[in-house]
Amino acid sequence: MADPFRAAGGIVTRDGALLVVHRPKYDDWSFAKGKLEDGETWEEGAVREVEEETGLQCEAGPLLGSTHYPFRTGTKEVRYFRMTCTGEARAQNEIDAVRWVTPTEARELLTYEDERALLDSL
């Protein structure tokens, strides 16, 4: 079996709110995430991807959990870190909208059940 595709992202928190992003390509709401580059640690990839998608400069905190799902010819693993940040979020790259929401609103808005399950680790 092929090695899993590796990706990482952040559950960005600020004043009790969580940051979610919308990707028009998939018409989904999720936490900011993306694939790791060669030689990158999980934490480095998570921080870079959140910044690329939202413009936020974040610091990775504890690992909150991971998701696994079928992807291309194998499995994709995404590890999510709790993050704090500075700056104002703005949609960029593959993202067309960002929203600060309460955990309850996030549970309703997030497209994927495995990401909703991560809310329990907060």
Image (tube, rainbow, N blue to C red):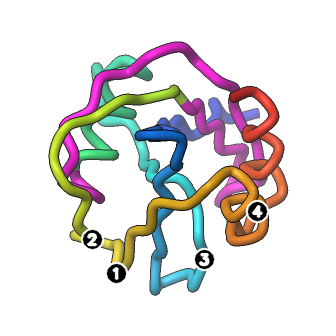
Q: Position of residue 72 (x, y in %)?
A: 65, 60
> Which of the labelled discs sits on residue 112, or is there none?
4
Task: Kindly identify the residue that appears in the image at 76 percent across and 33 percent down.
Answer: 1
Mark 4 residue element: loop
In space, the residues marked 2 and 4 are separated at their CA atoms by: 20 Å
- Which quarter of the rendered picture does the C terminus lie within? top right
Q: Are marks 3 and 4 in contact (CB under 8 Å)?
A: yes
- Mark 1 = which residue? 96
On screen, 121 above or below 113? above
Name the amino acid, label 3. Asp
- Circle 2 packing at 10 Å, graded few (<14), some (14-19), many (20+), is some
Looking at marks 1 and 4 on the same chain, the residue that comes earlier in the sequence is marked by 1
The secondary structure type at the circle numbered 3 is: strand
CA–CA distance between discs 1 and 2? 5 Å
Q: Earlier in the sequence, mark 3 or mark 4?
A: 3
- Magenta segment includes 69: yes
Q: Tell me which residue sits at (67%, 35%) in the image.
A: 2
Cα distance between the residues tagged 3 and 2: 14 Å
Mark 2 highlights which residue?
Answer: 91
Q: Secondary structure at mark 1?
A: loop
Q: What is the distance, in whole Å, between disc 1 and disc 4 at their CAs?
A: 18 Å
